[in-house]
Amino acid sequence: MQNLTIEVDFDRFPPEHTCDGENRSPRIRVGGSDAPYVAVVMDDPDAPRGTFTHWLAWNIPATGEIPAGIPPEPRVSRPVPAVQGTNDFRRTGYAGPCPPKGASHRFFIRVWSVARELDLPPGSGRSFLEDALSEAATGYGETMAVYERGRVPGASSGSLLRT
């Protein structure tokens, strides 16, 4: 499997890409792919109840960049064609970081190069996407950024609000 280079424009999510802002998907640069498509999964392994999936998208043309601002619709044609799955908020498309206040979480953006279009219906869940990728992926790469929402007023530095 090829190693892909995955980059975003930040190490810490700016509010525009989070639940505290516009919840706008970030621009993702993808290097090293020679396949015609890419798929992306964004997740939070630090979520209180285990890994939380924020975004599933596939059949994105491999142009070297997944542009920012992909609308949260099952099928999109702009800014690029894509099919999107259901995230753990039970919504289709991108849903930005939204950890409990005062808790810093890591968010992994994982990208696969894919040899052919994946035959998955819009709204498919993560396990279906992972199964399809196990047969069609030709490359993989990831990057990580963090996000911490504002501290809870009156909370000591050692205590965190848990939801």
Image: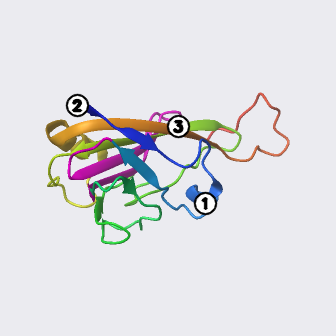
- Residues drawn in magenta: 32-60
The residue nearer to you, when weighing 57 against 116, is 116
> At label 1, which amino acid type do we have?
Glu
Q: Which of 36 and 72 is in front in this view?
A: 36
**Distance of label 1 from label 3 (alpha carbons):** 20 Å
- Label 2 near label 3: C-beta < 8 Å? no
- Please tell me which of labels 1 and 3 falls first in the chain: 1
Q: What residue type is labelled 2?
A: Met
Instruction: Name which residue lies at 38% across and 69% down.
Output: 79
Q: Does the magenta stretch include residue 43?
A: yes
Q: Which mark is residue 123?
A: none
- Viewer can see residue 99: yes
In this view, which residue lies farthest toward the top?
Answer: 158
Is 150 in front, or is 6?
Answer: 6
Residue at 36% in and 36% down: 141
- Give the distance between the C-alpha atoms of the residues marked 2 and 1, in whole angstroms: 34 Å
Sequence-wise first label, 2 or 1: 2
Residue 156 sits above or below residue 99 on the image: above
In this rendering, would 122 be left or right of 56?
A: left
Residue holding disc 2: 1
Residue position marked by numbered label 3 in the rendering: 47
Query: Label 1 belongs to which residue?
Result: 16
How busy is the neighbourhood of tag 2: few (under 14 within 10 Å), some, or many (20 plus)? few
Which secondary structure, mark 1?
helix
Residue that appears at 26% across and 58% down: 61
> Does residue 121 appear to the left or right of 19 in the view shown?
left
Give the left or right position of residue 133, taking residue 74 as reference. left
The amino acid at mark 3 is Ala
Count of numbered circles in the view = 3
Query: Which type of secondary structure does the marked residue at label 3 adopt?
Result: loop
Where does the C terminus fall, quadrant-wise?
A: top right
